[in-house]
Amino acid sequence: MKRIKLIVQYDGTDFCGWAAQKEQRSVQGTLKECIYRATGETVELRGASRTDSGAHALGQVADFATSLPIEPAKWAQIINRVAPIDIRVVKSSAANMDFHSRFFARSRTYRYTISEVDKVEPMKSRYVFEGGRQLDLARMQAAAKLLIGEHDFRAFGEELENVKNAVRRILVAEIVRKGNQLEIKLEANAFIRGMVRRISGGLFEVGRGHRSEESIARLLKTSARASQQLPVVLPAKGLTLMRVHYGRKLRDLRLDNDGSECQ
């Protein structure tokens, strides 16, 4: 047996998300089907991040074990031959048998894109949220800085009834303007469900003048959270998983026992 690591891109518009779900089209399920169609082998495919329905990826990482005598670098070509137009394997390579794409990841980087126009070009409409107004970039940048560090992000998640630990560490929170678009870049050790989209929603509200920068900081404090209105969750179509980071020394981060392996 040997383990294969994949770097995968996909347009998430027509998928229910990464994780396989019964009678729904998922990225994970589609990739497994591609591998079966190409080789006749059924594999257990694992992913680094469970992206939402409609979210995209340029740098998702997946892995699986196989007994087939196929060179690791050739798996990308083999899968791409049968893959649908909205999935592409960028690279395939050998990994240690104990490698786990999710639990070995040190951090993940997401980008959320907001357009300041109310109707973007059709070729871009699947990948940006149309905000429809000019935003105050300086205020948004000031609010984003307040997110950096280790905090309880429960106020920025959704469907967290069974999540005991919502503490995560944001390493990078940057916003840049490119033409009439704003790109929010967030890198964290891990994310809870809906975290990037609700953070982006909060920053969008700050940019519109509907929320103060200080309210973002108050949402991170358990004692003050109950009295605060939660930010809007922006649509998944503006969200892209850009990269999964592993570092030079690979190790299972579950050994840290900090609960940060989620998402």
Image (tube, helix red, strand yellow):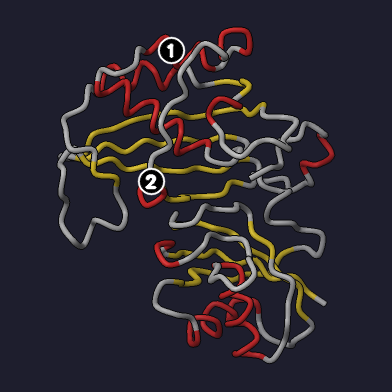
Q: Mark 2: which amino acid?
A: Pro
Answer with the quarter of the image where residue 201 lies. Answer: top left
Q: Which dot marks residue 215? A: 1
Q: Is residue 172 left or right of residue 49?
A: left
Image quadrant occupied by the C terminus: top right
Of pointers 2 and 1, the one earlier in the residue sequence:
1
Q: Please rate how many residues cluster around mark 1, counting C-alpha atoms within 10 Å: few if below 14, some from 14 to 19, many from 20.
A: some
Indicate the secondary structure of the residue bearing disc 1: helix
Gap between marks 2 and 1, in whole Å?
A: 22 Å
Measuring 73% from the left and 49% from the top, which residue is drawn there?
103
Q: Is residue 69 above or below residue 143?
A: below
Q: Position of residue 179 (x, y in %)?
A: 15, 40
Residue at horizontal 53 percent and vertical 29 percent from the top = 156
Quadrant housing the N terminus: bottom right
Q: Residue 182, position in %: x, y?
A: 26, 36
Residue plotted at (75% across, 86% down): 68
| Residue depicted at 46% across the width and 64% down the height | 9
Q: Quadrant of residue 41?
A: bottom right
Q: Nearer the viewer, residue 179 or 214?
A: 214
Element type where label 2 sits in the image: loop
Q: Nearer the viewer, residue 160 or 89?
A: 160
Which residue in the protein does label 2 denote? Answer: 235
Give above or below for 49 relative to 143: below
Within-10-Å neighbours for mark 2: few <14, some 14–19, many 20+: some
In the image, residue 135 lies at what x, y percent? 21, 27
Say how many tags the image has.
Answer: 2
Front in this rendered view, residue 174 or 153: 153
What's the mark number on residue 82? none
